[in-house]
Amino acid sequence: MTLLKEIGPEARSHRISVVIASILGFAVNKLPAHCEDCSLAQTLITIDQEPYLAHEQSDEYELAFDFIDCLCREAGMLNQRESARGEDYSIAENAILEYAAWYNMPWEDY
């Protein structure tokens, strides 16, 4: 949380989304083998294993979105933002998409 509080309020949102996605990935790698169903931990594991859920308004997406929204508020930054072109976007949504695609590198597939 200290990191997000330090960089959060002035951070460029496309960059902070990647930072949050990497924090989520780090946390998932530290989880025990078994996690409770319907927990945030299980949600992140599910999105990691089934990345299409990041593109749908699934229960997993909603739980992850709410968690990241709380992180943003705690760090003193707005989750919902407006681009210079007047388009609304969300750090949480972008972070979930980054997290789900973290290991998606099609150029490495042979």
Image (tube, grey):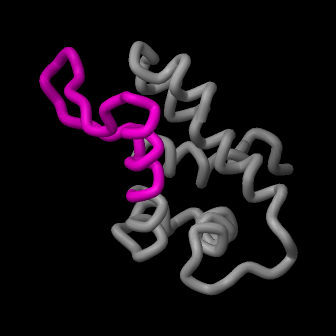
Q: Position of residue 57 (x, y in %)?
A: 34, 68
Q: Is residue 94 above or below residue 15?
A: below
Q: Position of residue 14 (x, y in %)?
A: 45, 26
Q: Is residue 71 in the magenta section? A: yes
Q: Is residue 14 above or below residue 55?
A: above
Q: Residue furthest left?
A: 86
Q: Position of residue 80 (x, y in %)?
A: 26, 38
Q: Is residue 37 left or right of residue 57?
A: right
Total residue callouts? 0
Q: Position of residue 70 (x, y in %)?
A: 41, 49
Q: Is residue 49 left or right of residue 43?
A: right
The residue positioned 81% from the left and 81% from the top of the image is 34
In the foreground, 108 or 29: 29
Q: Is residue 63 in the magenta section? A: no
The residue positioned 58% from the left and 68% from the top of the image is 40
* Quarter the N terminus occupies: top right
Q: Is residue 49 above or below residue 72?
A: below
The residue positioned 23% from the left and 22% from the top of the image is 83
The residue positioned 44% from the left and 65% from the top of the image is 61
Q: Which residues are magenta?
A: 66-92
